[in-house]
Image: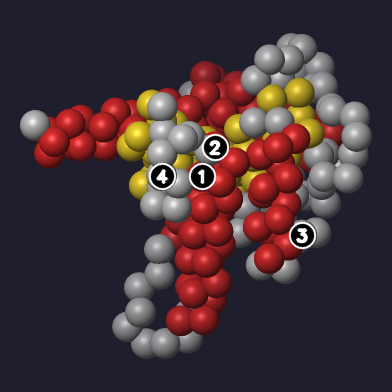
Amino acid sequence: RAQWQADTHRQEQALAELQQALKLTEPPNRIECYDISNTQGTAIVGSMVVFTQGVPDKKLYRRFNIESVVGAPDDFASMEEVLTRRFRRWQSARETADQPGVKTDESFTFLPDLLIVDGGKGQLGRAVSVLEKFELMGKVPVVGLAKQEEELFLPNRSKSLLLPRHSQGLYLIQRVRDEAQRFAITAHRKRRSKLGMASQ
């Protein structure tokens, strides 16, 4: 019980730190993170992981087999496809919400309190253009996370944001990003082995 209470306190602290650092109106209770995995442009897969109140919510994870990118790897176009498909699903969930007998997918029904894309300014730019297309800029806070220095890139800000080295907020963002990468790589390997079996 003490362990659970300590963990809960850490998660609350992490969410409060992120709220303050990113100037959000409320703690980011639903964080979604997206990553792309491929081998030289084949079997490209995008991952979506969801953390609810600082904890992985695995039943809401989804993977996307990329259809629009063929040949040379293009992580930017792949990310754009993943996010477009995600918010299209959100849109259609809203449109069918009142129809009797229609089951909605919880992964797509709600908007994130914080959207993280794995990658720096380039990936953030693609995420922003998708949000603008769905008229969600200003409603969905978005950041790009660059690997090397764990820099956070925000829309309309030239300078990146560095969270304090040993802060709970940074640890949470790293956990979310690592989970998105792990899930993307696992899904990519599955897809690649399926394609390999088919070609043989």
Q: Amino acid at mark 2?
A: Asp
Looking at the rendered structure, the kind of residue marked 4 is Val
Q: Which residue is mark 1?
A: 78
- Which of the colour schemes (rainbow, by chain, secondary structure, one colour) is used? secondary structure
At numbered mark 3, what does the secondary structure look like: helix, strand or loop? loop
Separation of marks 3 and 2 at Cα, in angstroms: 22 Å
Residue most toward the top?
A: 166
In this rendered view, identify the residue nearer to me: 161 or 133. Answer: 133
Q: CA distance from mark 2 to mark 1?
A: 5 Å
Q: Residue at x 52, y 81 (%)?
A: 95
Q: Which residue is mark 2?
A: 75
Q: Nearer the viewer, mark 3 or mark 1?
A: 1
- Among the two numbered marks 1 and 4 on one chain, the one whose residue lies closer to the N terminus: 4
Label 3, residues with CA under 10 Å away: few <14, some 14-19, many ≥20 = some
The residue singled out by tag 3 in the image is: 137
- Quadrant of residue 199 in the image? top left
Tag 4 residue: 70
184 to 10, vertically: above or below: below
Would you say the residues marked 1 and 4 are in contact, meaning their CB atoms lie under 8 Å apart?
no
- Secondary structure found at label 1: helix
Q: Nearer the viewer, mark 2 or mark 4?
A: 4
Residue type, mark 1 in image:
Ser
Q: Picture coordinates of residue 77 (x, y %)?
A: 56, 46
**Residues marked 2 and 1 touching at CB (< 8 Å):** yes
Is there any visible trace of residue 51 in the rendered image? no
Sequence-wise, the earlier of marks 2 and 4 is 4
Residue located 70% across and 37% down the image: 122
SS state under label 2 = helix
Residue beneath the point at 59% across and 41% down? 76
Q: Badge 4, how many Cα within 10 Å: few under 14, some, many 20+?
A: few
